[in-house]
Amino acid sequence: MLTSPPIEQAALEKLTWTWNDYKIQYTVLGEGRPLLLVHGFGASIGHWRKNIPVLAAAGYRVFALDLLGFGGSAKPALDYSLDLWEALIKDFWAAHIQTPTVFVGNSIGGLLCLMVLAHHSEISAGAVLLNCAGGMNHRPDELVLPLRLVMAGFTNLVRSPRLGPFVFNRIRQKHRIRRTLFQVYRNRAAVTEELVDLLYAPSCDEGAQKVFASVLTAPPGPTPAELLPQVQAPLLVIWGEADPWTPIAGAKIYQEFARTQALKFVSIPNTGHCPHDENPEAVNPLILDWLREIE
């Protein structure tokens, strides 16, 4: 395995692109074969700050964007969905990259990358999935009846014009963000004030509450089981074993497909939902080794 160079967290240049009259924030660093990094729910370009410089220094042209509704991108009042973001990613590729690309995604971003590979093979050279989500939200049949009723009540609360903003303003408080991160990161030292601020700052933007309500009540979208048979490009699936949100038990489908597809599965002990941020010393070399294997 390659030794990862020291992780430099230099400030990333923030660029803007207009998509369907909406501002999209992105960054790009390095020269070489293209990679496009796609963040998860509530995150942004900054969540890749420990990865972009290392991947770029290894000889790749690394793009990362803030999905519409997150980070520094516009936050219009829309019906958000995985299909909307898939169209955004495809159009971003057409505008800025235009050559087969390796897509790298965490959580919902991972599911989006899988969708791109399944539906747009002509633009895809492969993908790295980091604790890939099984859907935008839980499907009713995935929950026991009591929890189904609780989630239905919470959905109605979030949608409420009067109570929705109150709920959002409580959830987005810094101490609550920190508490949530302590649940999903095994290494508490990785939960820094910088990370909390990265997640908190966009929540102060106009329109953030409506985005939150729309995303949490959106349809779940396709499942990995539906998408994987359509994928022809190589996959690297990395899983933090200590993830309470997408437990490693849900990764069995990838391990099964690894027997017949060009899919490599690697689990990382004592690591949670965002292994690229919590444990970049392990993740960056895994990605670079695999990229060289598929060249």
Image (spheres, rainbow, N blue to C red):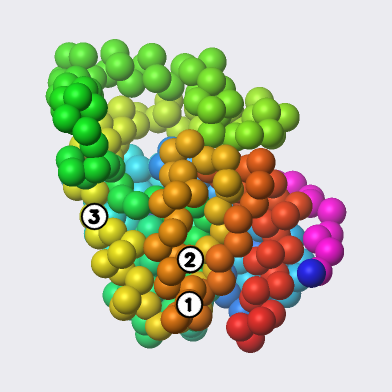
Q: Earlier in the sequence, mark 3 or mark 2?
A: 3
Residue at label 3? Answer: 221
Amino acid tagged 2: Gln
- Whether residue 8 appears in this view of the structure is yes
Whole-angstrom CA distance, mark 3 to mark 1, is 26 Å
Residue at the spot of label 2: 255
Q: Quadrant of residue 230?
A: bottom left
Residue 286 in picture, x, y percent from top left: 68, 64
Left or right of residue 109: residue 279: right
Judged from the image, the secondary structure of the residue bearing numbered disc 1 is: loop
Examine the structure image and report whether residue 183 is included in the region drawn in magenta. Answer: no
- Please name the residue that numbered disc 1 is placed on: 259
Q: Nearer the viewer, residue 113 or 256?
A: 256
Residue drawn at point x = 56 percent, y = 71 percent: 264
Local crowd at mark 1 within 10 Å, few (<14), some, or many (≥20)?
few
How many angstroms separate mark 3 from mark 2 (CA)? 22 Å
